[in-house]
Image: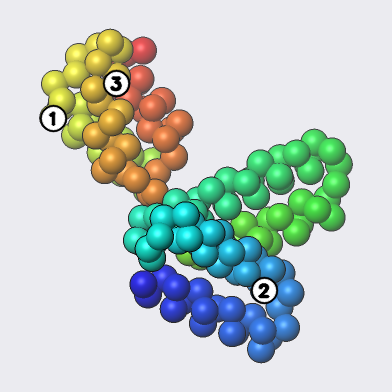
Amino acid sequence: MDFLNELNEQLKSAMKARDERALKTIRDLKARIKTKEIEKGEPLSEPEFVRIVQTAAKQRKEAIELYTQGNRPDLVDIEKAELEILNTYLPKMMTEEEMQILANKVVEATGATSMADIGKVMGPLMKEAAGKADGKRLQAIVREILGG
């Protein structure tokens, strides 16, 4: 529940500072959380909160890409500012080296030896790296390890 308290404190700070970008972003996030809580019928857990923030951040990244392609630097700047705010609520991401170490550990633990075993590896790996690593990058690392 402390993530909600932190969010409320950030909202108050943004109001006092008259930071319209932060206000919009935090209000959007709070609305997403409230919607999910209503759907679920109970307060969200920390991992659920992180997933909501990750979804919002992913949408911002996709918008940045599209606005860049559409030559709209004004909108790119807005999306980047919102993404920066959202990133403050996400856990610290794993480094490339940490992802390599974790992937090697899981490959060894599952006894995977070929690309046919990638499904056996990815499930436990994604569970362990949940919210802290990019799934596509982890998959590429596993493919390297398994020789694919």
Q: Residue at x 39, y 27 (%)?
A: 139
The residue carrying mark 1 is 109
Question: Is 85 on the left-hand or right-hand side of 47?
Answer: right
Q: Quadrant of residue 1?
A: bottom left
Disc 2/disc 3 C-alpha distance (Å): 42 Å
Q: Nearer the viewer, mark 1 or mark 2?
A: 2
The residue carrying mark 3 is 119
Q: Nearer the viewer, residue 24 or 143?
A: 24
Disc 1/disc 3 C-alpha distance (Å): 14 Å
Question: Where does the image place residue 102, in percent across and percent down from the top left?
Answer: 25, 38
Q: Quadrant of residue 25?
A: bottom right
Q: In the image, which disc is placed on residue 16? A: none
Question: Is 27 on the left-hand or right-hand side of 147?
Answer: right
Question: Where does the image place residue 144, in percent across and percent down from the top left?
Answer: 35, 20
- Amino acid at circle 1: Ala
Disc 1/disc 2 C-alpha distance (Å): 46 Å
Q: Which residue is drawn at 59% across and 84% down?
A: 13
Q: Quadrant of residue 28?
A: bottom right
Disc 1 packing (10 Å; few <14; some 14–19; many ≥20): few
Q: Which of marks 1 and 3 is in front?
A: 3
Q: Which of marks 1 and 3 is nearer the N terminus?
A: 1
